[in-house]
Amino acid sequence: FEEAKIRDVGMLENNELIDEAGKLVIFFNKMVDILHNALNSIHQKAFILIGYDVMNSGNTIKDTDKIVTELANIYKFKKTIEKDRSKEDIYERLRLILEHYMSLDKFSLYEVNYDKMKLIFANGTDKLWCKDDILKDNSCCRAYRTGADVDSDEFPNVCKCFIKEYNEFQKQEDSLEYYCIPIYLNGHVHNVLQIVYEHYMKDFVQMMIPYIKGYLDEAIPVMESKLLMEKLKEQSIKDQLTGFYNRRYIEEAIDPILSNAKRKGETIGILILDIDHFKEVNDTYGHDVGDLILKSVAQAIKESIRESDIPIRFGGEEFLVLLTNIKPGESENIAEKIRKNVENKAISLPNKTTLKKTISIGVSEIPTDTDKFWQAVKFADVALYKAKESGRNKVVRYQKDMWQEEEY
């Protein structure tokens, strides 16, 4: 703007013209100053709004245009993610922003899952940039543990989880660096974003970090809202005592589960489990001990099945377990494993004594016995009745002669 100002009118010979030109020059220069100050004010206020500055070119008009464009992009991003259905949708939008808008080709996003880390996505690699340890123990992740940014450019090999072999036998300009950002939701680190780059890209990545954090700052309150809704949803479909899903969950989720299994030609095992003589526990020891028994049996069930299987508290002392993608006939073996684990589990009571319980289990399979879910549940329930009728503490596989189709 200083270059735009008129500085010399002395070459004019007519004094009146000089006076008129001088007034015009003063007015023009004053307007230039006003425009310059106004654009600087816009720039500063935009900086406050988005929390970072855009790359300056030295041209105030161009720089103001860039920062207003960035404001518009941020606003559009926020309005878009507010209408997304879940955190996963927001994760995908962040991935696209990093890859296409910020031109980053190596990055990964993790989600904290209790004491473990869950990989959401990894761009630019077919394996993790970090050791598998962080998937088993989130305290191995330095960014999670400290709650602060981790920058390998400040201190080489600062994080012991980053796989060192990426840096070995490479020239420094090609060696990999990393910048990890902890993302706080509701006061706790919920995600860690990792940017990986070649050393020669250091200046570019450092310049992009404020942009990345600007988008994260806009995403965080929306993600917190989605997380709260997920927790409320989870509470409505989970049994608070055992941590298992409840009957409402299976009523909502079974159709896509069955459709997926049918499309892939997979077998689903149905187990109906009932604690033997549970009423006697409540009558003799009280409901607090009854709750201990329920939690102990639930734990034994959980320890006996895979993570992909779905345990459900079906009601009272009854449980249902969905065994996904199993071999035909395998359900009975898994049911027997559960039965033995429950039978061998000693439950410590408040009075310093221990108690053991047994469980009866009925088994059916889809599509071996039927292709209808609730009919398969009924068949497993019939088999459970036979197990109790023949002495309890048994596993009984449903047979066709146990139930006449016309009676269903």
Image: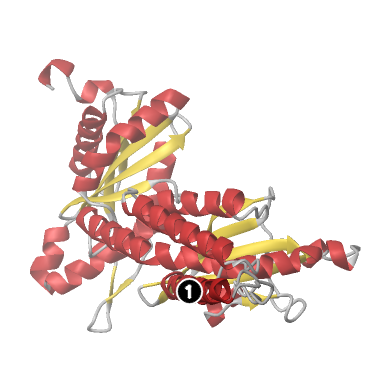
Q: Tag count in the figure?
A: 1
Amino acid on which the number 1 mark rests in the picture: Phe
Q: Is residue 385 left or right of residue 370?
A: left
Relative image position of residue 265 (x, y in whole percent): 45, 24
Q: Is residue 237 above or below residue 367?
A: below
Judge by depth and name the residue closer to the eye, 251 or 390: 251
Residue depicted at 58% across the width and 75% down the height:
18
Residue depicted at 34% across the width and 69% down the height:
346
Label 1 neighbourhood size at 10 Å, few (<14), some (14-19), many (20+)? few
Residue 73 appears in the figure: yes
| Picture quarter with the C terminus | top left
Q: Is residue 174 left or right of residue 371?
A: right
Q: Is residue 93 above or below residue 294?
A: above
Residue depicted at 34% across the width and 61% down the height:
222
Judge by depth and name the residue closer to the eye, 392 or 193: 193
| Picture quarter with the N terminus | bottom right
Relative image position of residue 213 (x, y in whole percent): 52, 68
- Looking at the image, which residue sits at the far left? 283
Q: Is residue 191 left or right of residue 227?
A: right
* Residue on which the image places disc 1: 27
Residue depicted at 28% across the width and 61% down the height:
231
Quadrant location of residue 144?
A: bottom right
Relative image position of residue 61 (x, y in whole percent): 55, 63
Coloring basis for residues: secondary structure
Judge by depth and name the residue closer to the eye, 227 or 154: 154
Q: SS of the residue at dot 1?
A: helix
Residue 339 appears in the figure: no
Quadrant location of residue 208?
A: bottom right
Q: Is residue 346 above or below residue 405?
A: below
